[in-house]
Amino acid sequence: MTRTNTSGTSGKSGMKARAGRVAVIGALGLASVSLAVAPAFAKGAVEITAPHTVQVGKTITVTAHGGDDSAGYLHQLCVEENGFGEGWHQETCSTPAKGDARVTAQGTSARGGDLRFRAVLYGLTSKHDQKPVRLHASDVVTVHVR
């Protein structure tokens, strides 16, 4: 048995309309999923200050402060140093805090050259969290030791 179209319209136009609706629905669905999956960026910032130049043997004082509005995290701010081919390593960290965190690092350099510093803000789930989440990092500041 064969079917015949007795309505006077071809089946192709109905298929085109259905395909168009499916495409629109699919695009809307994809857009809504993309918005739901996109990360929500918390507002936060980290700032660091250091002298531009110091003499060999003189104290270098680096201060940093930062915060973030991410819920559920304690914040810990660390000052990291990179100099003389050693790579980045932590100099000091603040105690975990619920609000803004501040830290000051002091030290001296026994030789001339450039030292680079940055501050990194971590999110902690507890004071003894072994896997902190990196939230923000400051720009790198360079101290010329001569």
Image: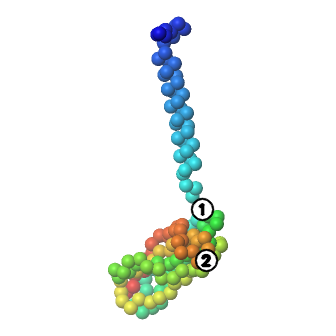
Q: Nearer the viewer, residue 28 or 104?
A: 28
Task: Name the residue: 36% across, 87% down.
Answer: 112
Q: Residue 81 falls in which quadrant of the image?
A: bottom left
Q: Which residue is mark 1?
A: 43
Q: Amino acid at mark 2?
A: Lys
- Count of number-bearing discs: 2
Q: Badge 2 local density, few (<14 within 10 Å), some, or many (20+)?
A: few
- Percent position (x, y) of residue 143? 42, 80
- In the rendered structure, the answer to whether residue 112 lies left or right of residue 45 reads left
The quadrant in which the C terminus is found is bottom left
- Direction from residue 68 to residue 4 in the image, left or right: left
Which residue is painted at 55% across and 37% down in the image?
Answer: 28
Task: Assign a secondary structure to mark 1.
Answer: loop
Q: Examine the rendered structure and indicate whether residue 10 appears above or below residue 52.
A: above
- Residue under label 2: 127
Query: In the rendering, at what x and y percent does residue 25 appear?
Result: 55, 33
Residue 100 is at least partly visible in this image: no
Query: In terms of secondary structure, where does tag 2 sit?
Result: loop
**At 61% across and 74% down in the image, what residue appears?**
126
What kind of residue is marked 1?
Lys
